[in-house]
Image (cartoon, helix red, strand yellow):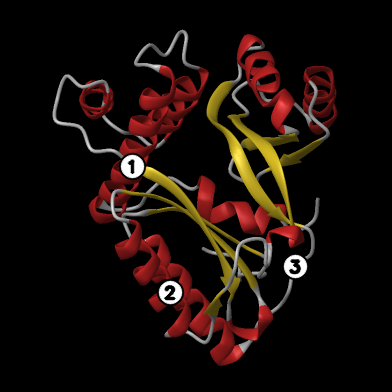
Amino acid sequence: MSGHSKWNNIKNKKAKGDAARSKIFTKIGREIAVAVKAGGPDINSNSKLYDVVQKAKANNMPNDNITRSIKKASGELNAVNYEEMMYEGYGIGGSAVIVESLTDNKNRTAGDVRCAFDKNGGSLGQSNCVSFMFDHKGVVVVENNLRLDEDSAFELALEAGADDVQFDEEGTIAMYCDMATLASVRDAVVAKGLVLVSAEMQWLPQNMVTLEGDNLVKFQRMLDTLEDNDDVQNVYHNVELPDEE
């Protein structure tokens, strides 16, 4: 699954600095709200909520914040209803971009996303205009706290129903699977004693493209604008980005 590590680096890195951490807490809080609305406030019976809470903990979100988000969504506190929206478009140089959002104002979010594309050489498109260039896969990310080697991790993943594995330089393992086996792969690795970082569906690019010079600068600026927006949960694309320090 070439290209996944670079594409996944930004998504799986923990926040650096108070401002970045606050942004991530806001986004995860919205994910908690949607999960509670869909399946209730009990993480033991709500698999999606369990996954989001584990993601929150992996990003060092305080337990008080997590509890408050759950109570807010379950009606114990003033709740806000968020709607899931997905936008597709072309970045500069013909790159493909998918933006997932959770918003309480579709018009505001659509305008912000369109503006980010337009100002940086891209264009927002119609539904399905680029998603065919991606595979919608389950991705289970765990800390390699058991110090498994690649063969052992791959064997565990295959037994659980995954179809590929990738080691990360920072000591994590990503396991890729279909939507139907996401929960079973997650449960299997947790049962083995690996620490869960996240388990969720992601859009994985089938092929990567390279941008250079000013085009790369504009594309990165568009990504930064989108990711800085509280309504935007995830941004997926097929551009090879330079390795970060």
Q: Please state the horizontal and vertical placement of residue 140, each as a whole percent of the image.
A: 63, 32
Q: Pointer 1 and pointer 2: residues touching (CB < 8 Å)? A: no
Q: Position of residue 47 (x, y in %)?
A: 52, 18
Q: Residue 154, position in %: x, y?
A: 82, 29
Residue at 34% of width from left, 16% of height from top?
41
Check if mark 3's residue and mark 1's residue have beta carbons within 8 Å: no
Name the N-terminal-most of marks 3 and 1.
1
Q: Secondary structure at mark 3?
A: loop
245 or 178, nearer to the observer: 178
Task: Name the residue carrying label 2.
Answer: 114
Sequence-wise, which precedes: disc 1 or disc 2?
A: 1
- Amino acid identity at mark 3: Met
* Residue 10 in the figure: left or right of residue 230: right
Say what secondary structure mark 1 lies in. Answer: loop
The count of marks equals 3
**Local crowd size for mark 2, using a 10 Å CA cut-off: few (<14), some (14–19), many (≥20):** some
**What residue is at 44 percent from the left and 29 percent from the top?**
52
Residue on which disc 1 sits: 82
Which residue is under mark 3? Answer: 208
- Label 3 vs label 1, nearer the camera: 1
Above or below, 53 against 17 in this view is above
Measured along the vertical axis of the image, is residue 36 above or below residue 240? above
Around disc 1, counting alpha carbons within 10 Å, would you say few (fewer than 14), some (14 to 19), or many (20 or more)?
Answer: some
Please determine whether, in this image, residue 210 is positioned above or below residue 54.
below
Seen from the viewer's position, the closer of residues 77 and 152 is 77
- Residue at image point 63% right, 57% down: 7
* Residue 230 pos. (x, y %): 31, 55
For residue 113, which quarter of the picture?
bottom left
Image side of residue 90 versus residue 37, left or right: right
Between the C-alphas of marks 2 and 3, the distance is 23 Å
Amino acid type at circle 1 is: Tyr
Disc 2 marks a residue whose amino acid type is Arg
